[in-house]
Amino acid sequence: MHRLGCLNLETGIHLLQYICLTGHGSKVFDEAMKNIAKINKLFDRQFRPNILMGINIDQAHNRHPYLDAHMRYFTSHKKDSNSEQLVIPKMMDPLKLLKRFEGGPHQLFYGGDNVVKYYE
């Protein structure tokens, strides 16, 4: 059974999709990571704590800097009542397991803020 098949519908608000990028010691990538960290720090000062989500810069991945980014699959209509609901792409959810989490107690929907572009 797919792991999503075991989840309670209450957990849908916490489902995330992740990507981890590293240059494995590339000087160009390491320099870019330093610059991203500076920009992130500038933005972070402008918002209350825990407002910005989605980017973590760390040094633990084989001792090389890496970028760990994530995005929620769903938004709650309670927090965003103006955005339009979109159809979850078949490539992202071929077995329609994510579709089960739409609506429910948190009034979840897949909207523009949840879209991640996939390139092959």
Image (cartoon, grey):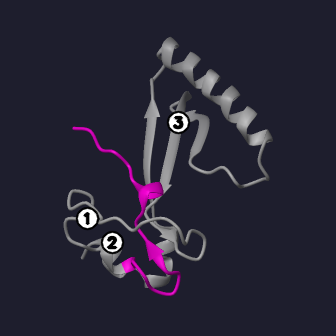
Q: Position of residue 47 (x, y in %)?
A: 77, 48
Direction from residue 78 to residue 28 in the image, left or right: left
Where does the magenta region start and end? Answer: 101-120
Q: Which residue is mark 1?
A: 93
Residue 30 lies in magenta, yes or no? no
Looking at the image, residue 116 lies above or below residue 7: above
Q: Are marks 1 and 2 in contact (CB under 8 Å)?
A: yes
Looking at the image, residue 32 lies above or below residue 67: above
State the CA–CA distance, disc 1 to disc 2: 6 Å
The amino acid sitting under disc 3 is Leu
| Numbered disc total | 3
Q: Which residue is mark 3?
A: 67
Q: Position of residue 98 (x, y in %)?
A: 33, 71
Direction from residue 35 to residue 26 in the image, left or right: left
* Element at label 1: loop
Q: Answer few, some or many: residues within 10 Å of disc 1's Cα (few below 14, many 20 plus, some between 14 and 19).
A: few
The amino acid sitting under disc 1 is Asp
